[in-house]
């Protein structure tokens, strides 16, 4: 049956279907959302808003009652009085409005208003470290776990009511969910108080694994962005350097609350020292110390190089153990020491870095001969042990020869040098080269002082020490990197080496020169000082057999090798630090005490390192690079701590590796009490500050004299 063609109002109407399939259809309206509404991070401050009525109340109470006075009827004067009264009333009303607005703006500024964006729903996840290290407690004070609970509690209480919050607990075994996302602070708080730190064996967990667990939970909850807050002391097995990764959610943010690590007391000390120093092209010396573990059973010390186990040492319990071992590695890399007890990996670690070997370029300048200081220096600094070596006469040290300067210049008993040559040497030293000056019988002391070489070395030669009895070493500074690798037995052997003659030298107090070896009854024998980016050493005795037997003794050979490595900047004797201790780094000139860390999201953090400054441009490109203390590699690796700014708290700069597009924000524990969690939005504090300034200027303009 054919249906008639209907026209006009009798025609079949399908407006919804027609608008759905045609181009340009609006479709279904978006679901209503309150994310774009005005909200406050500190709504309790709004209770002070009635104070804005205080100026009006004072104005009403201070108004004087109208009084009628007898006055001569002067019409002109009456017109002037009426005009002034009208202007005065307008001025008072304007001041009243401005003062009311000022108080209201101050209250709103304290309430921290912001207007949320329509970018999507954000899920806030608080991740707490529940590893055993969080139970460590200071001698007086709370444990790291109690501080973490207080920080999380403060965050939850300051969090916006419309912000969904979830909890993650993580340790060396991974991350686990605690409860369900909630928009009320009470459920997360209840789940928070049920958590306890427990020791669990397992592999180190990278930050990327924790972030992936948070991203998976956010995807299941339908969140378009995640605000992950990590609260940890960042000790031990929980963290390691994460591999470079790309964040699936560019809007994600990682905020880190680094708790000050509780210093251990009593017998539970753990690994107290790890030092790695290169002593040859393929030889690296490693010193370790494990103090009073107090576990009641033996422990095992594992030493790994670039993740590969190279030594496993079994140490007795309840004692202080220290030792030295040698490993062979021309390439170097990341050295890690950890301990185990009964097969359980404990969260005590130390880290160091071994710089790869690079041959030195050495020039030895002297008068020539077979038994002279320059000949013995060339034999001791063997090219196979240290690097390519060239013996050159002093006359060839002209400025035009310095096209390719050496890493180390040795002036071995040189008679004299022109002033312009010494100036060129000083210029190269300030640029990073090393200088070893050896005084001897051929040295012209007048030329040594007049040419400026004495000023460059930071000491002046006074007289010749010569007698029937040999001179002996009396004072040693084992804390200096040159002597730090020597064992007590080797230092004793160095003290017994006889010296027939030496020059008495006096150190300039203003030169910051440091005495490493001193003579019994005499002055310094070996001094060093930093000059710009380079280093200078002065040896006050010759290396030929007429002045002593130094060249024939093994400790002297090792001493000169370490001098060459130190002066050229090749000695990578960087001691690792425990969390809670500041970094100690030889990088940078004296007086530089902090570095500026730049992150791709625009944030920056100022890091101070043990009173010795790092060059500000050292860490300009964090990216996938790595940085360790005292070496040439830029890597934020795990368990290296630094003191941030002048705030007096310790922050693991190692953890803040920027992975992909994730932004990492540094927070102090006390900031958790004021920051809170909030969905993405536009903070209105800058606008309120501008409004406040405008109101103050307006009031000052109205109240100015003459108005």
Image: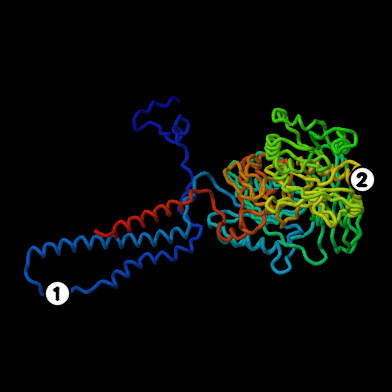
Q: Is residue 673 left or right of residue 132?
A: left
How far across and how far down the image is residue 321, in percent?
88, 58
How far across and how far down the image is residue 335, in percent?
81, 46
Number of other residues with Cα within 10 Å of mark 2, as a class: few under 14, some 14 to 19, many 20 or more = some
Question: Foreground residue, 533 or 394?
Answer: 394
As helix, strand or loop, the secondary structure at mark 1 comes to loop
Question: Tag on residue 338?
Answer: none
Sequence-first disc among 1 and 2 = 1
Question: Foreground residue, 534 or 698?
Answer: 534
Q: Which residue is mark 1?
A: 68
Q: Is residue 255 above or below residue 296?
A: above
Counting every numbered tag in the picture gives 2
**Viewer-nearest of discs 1 and 2:** 2
Picture quarter with the C terminus:
bottom left
As helix, strand or loop, the secondary structure at mark 2 comes to loop
Residue 639 in sight from this viewpoint: no
Which residue lies at the image location 80% right of the left edge and 30% below the top edge? 392
Picture quarter with the N terminus:
top left
Q: Quadrant of residue 156?
A: bottom right
Which residue lies at the image location 68% right of the left edge and 59% below the top edge? 260
Q: Which residue is mark 2?
A: 549
Number of other residues with Cα within 10 Å of mark 1, as a class: few under 14, some 14 to 19, many 20 or more = few
How far across and how far down the image is residue 655, in percent?
69, 49
Residue 593 in sight from this viewpoint: yes
Q: Is residue 187 left or right of residue 633?
A: left
């Amino acid at each position: 049956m054919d249906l008639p063609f209907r026209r006009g109002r009798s025609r079949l109407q399908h407006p919804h279907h027609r608008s759905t399939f045609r181009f340009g259809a609006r479709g279904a309206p978006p679901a209503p959302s309150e994310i774009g509404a005005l909200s406050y991070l500190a709504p309790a401050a709004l209770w002070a808003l009635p104070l804005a009525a205080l100026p009006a109340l004072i104005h009403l109470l201070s108004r004087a009652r109208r009084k009628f006075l007898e006055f001569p009827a002067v019409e002109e004067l009456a017109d002037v009085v009426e005009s002034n009264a009208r202007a005065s009333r307008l001025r008072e009303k304007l001041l009243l409005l401005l003062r009311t607005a000022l108080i209201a703006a101050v209250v709103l500024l304290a309430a921290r208003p912001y207007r949320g964006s329509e970018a999507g729903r954000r899920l806030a996840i608080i991740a707490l470290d529940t590893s055993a290290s969080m139970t460590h407690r200071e001698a007086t004070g709370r444990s790291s776990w109690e501080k973490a609970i207080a920080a999380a509690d403060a965050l939850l209480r300051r969090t916006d009511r419309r912000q969904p919050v979830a909890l993650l607990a993580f340790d060396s075994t991974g991350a686990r969910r605690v409860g369900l996302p909630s928009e009320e602070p009470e459920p997360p708080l209840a789940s928070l108080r049920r958590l306890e730190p427990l020791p669990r064996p397992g592999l180190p967990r990278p930050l990327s694994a924790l972030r992936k667990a948070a991203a998976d939970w956010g995807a299941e909850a339908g969140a378009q962005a995640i605000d992950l807050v990590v609260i940890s002391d960042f000790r031990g097995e929980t963290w390691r350097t994460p591999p470079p990764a790309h964040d699936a959610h560019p809007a994600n943010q990682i905020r880190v609350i680094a708790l000050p690590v509780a210093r251990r007391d009593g017998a539970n000390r753990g690994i107290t020292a790890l030092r790695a120093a290169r002593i040859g092209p393929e030889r690296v010396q490693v010193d370790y110390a494990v103090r009073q573990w107090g576990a009641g059973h033996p422990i095992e010390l594992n030493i790994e190089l670039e993740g590969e186990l190279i030594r496993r040492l079994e140490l007795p319990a309840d004692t202080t153990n220290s030792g030295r071992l040698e490993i062979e590695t021309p390439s170097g890399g990341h050295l890690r020491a950890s301990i185990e007890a009964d097969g359980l990996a404990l969260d005590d670690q130390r880290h160091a870095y071994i710089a790869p070997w690079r041959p030195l370029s050495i020039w030895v300048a002297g008068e020539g001969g077979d038994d002279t200081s320059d000949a013995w220096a060339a034999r001791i600094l063997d090219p196979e042990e240290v690097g390519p070596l060239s013996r050159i006469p002093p006359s060839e040290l002209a400025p035009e020869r310095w096209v390719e300067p050496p890493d180390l210049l040795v002036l071995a008993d040189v008679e004299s040098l022109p002033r312009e040559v010494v100036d060129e040497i000083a210029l190269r030293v300030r640029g990073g080269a090393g200088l070893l000056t050896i005084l001897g019988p051929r040295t012209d002391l007048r030329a040594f002082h007049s040419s400026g070489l004495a000023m460059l070395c930071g000491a002046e030669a006074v007289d010749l020490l010569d007698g029937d009895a040999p001179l002996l070493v009396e004072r040693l500074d084992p804390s200096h990197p040159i002597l730090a690798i020597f064992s007590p037995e080797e230092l004793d052997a160095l003290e017994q080496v006889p010296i027939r003659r030496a020059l008495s030298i006096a150190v300039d107090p203003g030169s910051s020169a440091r005495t490493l070896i001193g003579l019994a009854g005499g002055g310094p024998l070996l001094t060093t000082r930093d000059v710009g980016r380079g280093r200078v050493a002065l040896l006050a005795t010759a290396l030929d057999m007429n002045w002593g037997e130094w060249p024939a003794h093994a400790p002297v050979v090792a001493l000169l090798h370490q001098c060459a490595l130190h002066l050229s900047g090749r000695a990578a004797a960087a001691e690792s630090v425990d969390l809670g201790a500041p970094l100690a780094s030889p990088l940078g000139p004296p007086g530089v005490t902090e570095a500026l860390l730049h992150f791709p999201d625009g944030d920056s953090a100022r890091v101070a390192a043990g009173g010795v400054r790092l060059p500000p441009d050292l860490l300009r490109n964090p990216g996938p690079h790595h940085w360790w203390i005292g070496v040439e590699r830029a890597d934020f690796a795990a368990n290296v701590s630094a003191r941030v700014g002048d705030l007096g708290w310790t922050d693991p700069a190692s953890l803040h590796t920027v992975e992909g597009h994730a932004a990492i924000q540094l927070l102090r524990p006390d900031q958790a009490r004021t920051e809170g969690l909030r969905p993405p939005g536009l903070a209105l504090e800058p606008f309120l500050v501008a409004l406040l300034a405008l109101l103050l200027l307006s009031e000052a303009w109205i109240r100015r004299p003459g108005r």
